[in-house]
Amino acid sequence: SDLSTVDQDQFVNGGEAENFACSECKLIYLPSGTYVHPECGKIFCLACSKESKICPYCGAKLEEKTILLKDWNSGVYKSFQIQEIKCKNPSPDNYDVKGCGWKGPLSDFISHQKKCDNNIVQCPRGCGYSCPKKIYGAARQK
């Protein structure tokens, strides 16, 4: 799964999520990949800030002025880091249900994702099958 973005439905307090979404593509990037246009305060991801060239909100050049959120406003950056989110990996009992049960601050999301037993992995034999790492590991041991 993509470790650079989080989904709006992962936020435990969903109303906060839209405050951190890219103003253009609406994706929510992890704080380290979130940029701000200081003249109007709109949030952009790096791709949109380079692609758009001109801020659609204030008309100023984006590429020259966009800075990392943490460098622009450490208070907003810190409030982003402490947002409580849920894991986006499937439930071990139902692959259609998101969430392995983990909840924690956004700052711990990447470390959890890297070790989560419910990460979806592809079969190394190339058959196209994918399943949670925990199930694949158990099947290999049989």
Image (cartoon, rainbow, N blue to C red):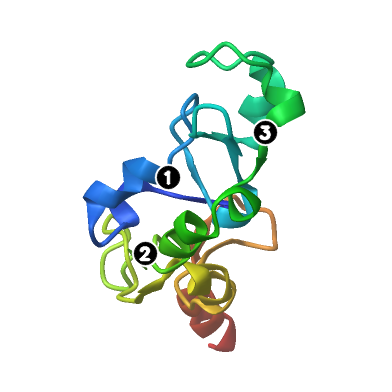
Q: Is residue 118 above or below residue 7?
A: below
Q: Could you tell me if residue 12 is visible in this image?
A: yes
The amino acid type found where label 1 is placed reads Phe
Q: Is residue 42 above or below residue 68?
A: above
Kindly identify which residue carries mark 1.
Answer: 20
Q: CA distance from mark 3 to mark 2?
A: 23 Å
Q: Position of residue 135 (x, y in %)?
A: 46, 76
Mark 3, Cα crowd under 10 Å, few <14 / some 14-19 / many 20+, is many
Which image quarter: residue 39? top right
Q: Position of residue 119 (x, y in %)?
A: 50, 67
Kindly identify which residue carries mark 2.
Answer: 83
Report whether 6 appears left or right of 129.
left
Which image quarter: residue 87? bottom left
Kindly identify which residue carries mark 3.
Answer: 66
Q: Position of residue 71 (x, y in %)?
A: 65, 53
Q: Nearer the viewer, residue 80 or 132?
A: 80
Q: Element type at marker 2?
A: loop
Which image quarter: residue 93? bottom left
- Looking at the image, do the residues carrying marks 2 and 1 touch, with CB atoms under 8 Å apart? yes
Q: Position of residue 44 (x, y in %)?
A: 56, 33
- Screen quadrant of the N terminus: bottom right
The amino acid type found where label 3 is placed reads Thr
Q: Element type at marker 3?
A: loop
Report whether 112 appears left or right of 68.
left
N-terminal of the two: label 2 or label 1?
1
Q: CA distance from mark 2 to mark 1?
A: 10 Å
The amino acid type found where label 2 is placed reads Gln
Report whether 110 appears left or right of 6.
right
